[in-house]
Each structure stands twice: as structure tokens, then as C-alpha cells.
């Protein structure tokens, strides 16, 4: 009973729930912003790596390799704590968005590259024979087909980014984990952290199942 009273105190959970919901709202906004900018940046990096002049191609490869290797926490700390030394300051939300977007862009670029390279070269040749420009070919022929391949791993990366939003608490952004930590300190009880864990699970578990469904459907379509 003492364990339940300490870690699953219903009164404290109910009292802290509005605080946790505010943190959840910030977490969702942060995740959506990071995914939006990260996916756009990743597609641009992918096209640079595949079709840009050689110096831009090597620059894209360098970026992708670096940010796939760096932990998100290190990138976040550098942006929030190191850049002010150079006179560049961002809010905690902006810093977290930039850090998450930069890392996601690197992984998205590799996923998109694999998807585009999975398309037969005959598709490019057929589009060229029809007189389609490069950008129209990419937009109307290549990317719609590549999308079927990249959706499962891309969705998986997005789920990972939502989990990594918890790192924003390091720079005092009031996300779900930060609000739970503050509530724990205020109420002198770890129940708010358990509540945050339950909310993370309820929010992310359907997304994890969605990834599994997309992967299974992709396998079925590929086997036909």
C-alpha cells in the first residue's frame, strides 16, 4: 500500500493533471514543428545529395553524416548554451525545434534517398522521353512512388522525434517531462512523473502500432 500511495497517489495525479496537459500541448507543438521543418529539410538534403553539383553533394553528405552521429542532446545544448556566446540567442522552444529538425533532416534525407533510388531508372527515362522537366518528373512521377517506400521508416523517425522532445526539459522548456518534474517537486511526490509516463504511452503507442501496420502493408504490396 505504501508503494501505491507513493507512486500512484490518485489525489495528486488528479491535481497535477492540468499541469501535465499544458506540458503535453507544448510537446505536441514542438514535435509537429520539428517534423514539419525536419521533413522539408531532409527532402532538400536528399535532392542535393543525389542531383546537386559535386561541391553541394559533398556538403550534404557531410551534414548528413555529422547530424546522424551527434546525439540530439549535444546539438540542443550547443544551440541553447553555446550560440549565445556568439551573440545568437533563441528561446527554449526555438532551440529545441532547431535541434530536433536538424537531426531529423539528416535521417529523413537518407530515408528519402533510399526511396528514390528504389525507383527504376526507366521511370526517369520515360519521363524524359515525354519531355517532362526534372522538377515535374520528381513531383509527379518519382516522389509519389517513393512515398510508398519511405512512409514506414519516416513515420518511425517521427515517433522517435516525439520521444526525444523530452530532452527539451534540459533547456527549461515547459514540455510534458518538465511540467511533470516541476509538479513532482511542488507536491513532493513522484506520481506526476508516473502520470507523464502514462500520457506518453497513451499518445505514442497508437503511433507505434501505425508504424507496424504501415510496414506490414508495405510488405504485402511488395510481395504482390
Image (cartoon, rainbow, N blue to C red):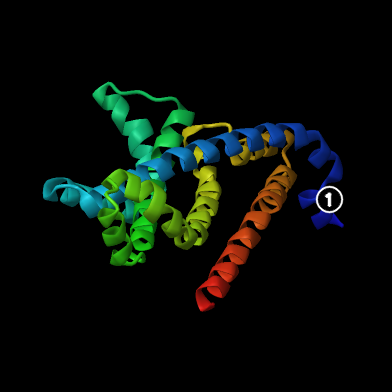
Give the quarter of the figure containing the N terminus. Answer: bottom right
Q: Secondary structure at mark 1?
A: helix
Total of numbered circles in the picture?
Answer: 1
Across and down, in percent, residue 122 comes to 30, 66
Q: Residue at x 82, y 46 (%)?
A: 9
Residue 27, quarter of picture:
top right
Across and down, in percent, residue 18 comes to 75, 32
In the rendered view, does 178 fall on the left or right side of 12? left
Q: Residue at x 41, y 43 (%)?
A: 38
Q: Residue at x 29, y 48 (%)?
A: 132
Visible residue check, residue 16: no
Across and down, in percent, residue 25 comes to 64, 34
Q: Residue at x 53, y 41 (%)?
A: 31
In the rendered view, does 190 fall on the left or right side of 51? right
Q: Which residue is mark 1?
A: 5
Viewer-nearest residue: 59 or 17: 59
Across and down, in percent, residue 91 comes to 44, 25
Viewer-nearest residue: 77 or 213: 213
In the rendered view, does 155 fall on the left or right side of 24? left
Furthest residue in direction front, as rendered: 130
Furthest residue in direction top, as rendered: 87
Give the quarter of the figure containing the C terminus. Answer: bottom right
Furthest residue in direction bottom, as rendered: 223
Viewer-nearest residue: 15 or 223: 223
Visible residue check, residue 220: yes
> Crowdedness of circle 1 by 10 Å Cα count: few (<14), some, many (20+)?
few
Amino acid at each position: 500500500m505504501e508503494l501505491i500511495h507513493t507512486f500512484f497517489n490518485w489525489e495528486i495525479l488528479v491535481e497535477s493533471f492540468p499541469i501535465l496537459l499544458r506540458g503535453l500541448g507544448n510537446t505536441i507543438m514542438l514535435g509537429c514543428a520539428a517534423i514539419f521543418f525536419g521533413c522539408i529539410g531532409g527532402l532538400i538534403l536528399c535532392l542535393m545529395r543525389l542531383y546537386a553539383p559535386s561541391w553541394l553533394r559533398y556538403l550534404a553528405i557531410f551534414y548528413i553524416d555529422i547530424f546522424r552521429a551527434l546525439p540530439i542532446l549535444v546539438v540542443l545544448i550547443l544551440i541553447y548554451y553555446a550560440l549565445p556566446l556568439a551573440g545568437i540567442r533563441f528561446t527554449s522552444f526555438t532551440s529545441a525545434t532547431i535541434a530536433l529538425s536538424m537531426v531529423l533532416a539528416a535521417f529523413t534525407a537518407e530515408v528519402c534517398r533510399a526511396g528514390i533510388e528504389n525507383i527504376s531508372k526507366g521511370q526517369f527515362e520515360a519521363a524524359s522521353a515525354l519531355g517532362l522537366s526534372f522538377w515535374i518528373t520528381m513531383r509527379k512521377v518519382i516522389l509519389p512512388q517513393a512515398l510508398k517506400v519511405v512512409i514506414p521508416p519516416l513515420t518511425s523517425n517521427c515517433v522517435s522525434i516525439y520521444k526525444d522532445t523530452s530532452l527539451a526539459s534540459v533547456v527549461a522548456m515547459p514540455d510534458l517531462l518538465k511540467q511533470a518534474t516541476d509538479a513532482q517537486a511542488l507536491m513532493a511526490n513522484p506520481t506526476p512523473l508516473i502520470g507523464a509516463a502514462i500520457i506518453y504511452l497513451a499518445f505514442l503507442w497508437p503511433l507505434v502500432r501505425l508504424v507496424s501496420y504501415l510496414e506490414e502493408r508495405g510488405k504485402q504490396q511488395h510481395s504482390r
